[in-house]
Image: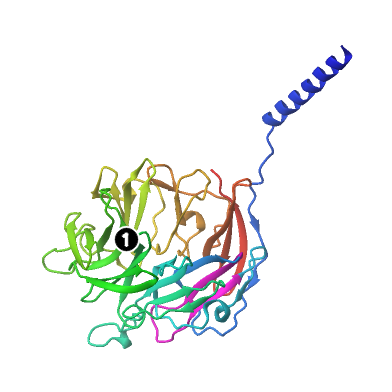
Amino acid sequence: MKRLLLSLAVLAFWGCKKTENSNNPQTQDKNTIYTSVQNIVYSSPLKVNSIHPETVKIIQVNGNYHLVTSFADLFGTTYDYFRSFRIDTNSGLLTENTTSLLGEYKEVGFPKSPFYYEDLNGDGIKDLFVADHGKETPSLIVNGQFPGYVNHLFWGNSNGTFSKAAVAELTNIQKFYHNSAVGDIDNDGDKDLVVQSFSNSEMELFINANGTLGKRINIAPQNQTGSIFIADMDTDGITDLVSAPYIDRSATPATYIQKINITNNTFTKTNSSTVRPFGNDFGCYKVIGMPNSNNANKYNFFYFVESGILSQKIFRSKDNDHKQLEEISTVQSTAASNNIRDYLIIDLNFDKLNDILFITNPGEPLNKRVWLNKGGNIFENANWDVNSTLTDFFIPISQNASSGKTKFLYFNPLQSQIIEIYTKK
């Protein structure tokens, strides 16, 4: 009997203990952690002092994190290079390793995002690609046109380094390239590449086939294409190329959002909007497509449009009809921005909904750049505890679901540090 009573007492003790723990869960540390500021270590002197705001990528190779970016300015005649830096994820120190990681210093004009880290030759190793339209410097204009520049492709190697690639008509011809898209356009299970430029051949399709990336066709829908995206636009099971027009300057309106389909070496086009879908004097420079979290079979498309520097609007396709658009300001409460360029789609607050982080908005505090998904791809800005005077580059490195924190690399051309923020919902 004593042994039984003792056992019951022990069970009662642990039962109370369990109840006490469940009623008083461990308090999470929600304080933001800032490391000390580190000076960036450069192996080669800079020729320009600005990081191009559309070409920033953090990659993880063989357990190490690297920042890859270009130093470039839009106006001027001086050119710098693609540069890479090894990241100390504890201190935030950036140490340049361009020669050892990228293989060489490669000159850049003015690259245009997206900056892709994808396997483009089917060897199972991710590669780096970005389009580049070059400078918009008046003194460089020839016959009324800017000279343009060449695209940049780095093949990934098995040892974790990269080698500059040479692909005919992709990396050796200067054009005013404006956008690009990566996706499986021919439905064979690998990633293909479409590059858009302001030229007679509005778009060029490069097919990833048997380990070779090569040009297939020119795509010229005569739509003044300014931005492109690859997705099943109308959920019919067929991959589409979305063409969004830039500013329609013709006397008679003639531009639409178009759905383009590829069959072998030919294309067909279907208008998927009203004429001049973004109004007069505005044209699309970037498209984001996201499966709707309330209906995964349907996409929402976000069209980022501009009429000039720091004059921007954002449109969203309606849930029930991708051909109909609504201006973002009418459907969501995110802060207005005139500096959006490149982005990451990532679940930042651990609620299993994809959020959007606009990584290249220097001059704006972090919370203004973050779109948190409320469901159905309607977003609101974050309200995290982070110093609002920090307005340079923020890029997430890692996340910890247990602590609810996201670790960011924060940097500018001179200094860097690690900032850990409690981002959990």
Expressed as whole percent of the image width and height from the top left, the position of residue 39 reads 64, 74
- Image quarter in which the N terminus is found: top right
Where 313 sits versus 251, above or below?
A: above
- Label 1 Cα neighbours within 10 Å, binned few <14 / some 14-19 / many ≥20: many
Above or below for 379 versus 311 = above
Quarter of the figure with residue 141:
bottom left
Regarding residue 28, the answer to whether it shows in the image is: yes
Choose top left, top right, bottom left or bottom right for residue 389: bottom right
Magenta segment boundaries in residue numbering: 63-86
Q: Which residue is drawn at 64% across and 63% down?
A: 89
Q: Which amino acid does label 1 sit on?
A: Phe
Q: Position of residue 60 (x, y in %)?
A: 56, 65
Residue found at the very far left of the displayed protein:
252
| Residue 215 horizontal/vertical position (percent) | 29, 74
Percent position of residue 144, x then y: 23, 84
| Residue at x 54% of width, y 57% of height | 388
Outermost residue on the front side: it is 210
Q: Residue furthest right?
A: 2
Q: Nearer the viewer, residue 232 or 229?
A: 232
The answer to whether residue 281 is left or right of residue 207 is: left
In the picture of the structure, the residue carrying the numbered disc 1 is: 229
316 vs 181: above or below: above
Colour approach in the figure: rainbow
Give the secondary structure at mark 1.
strand
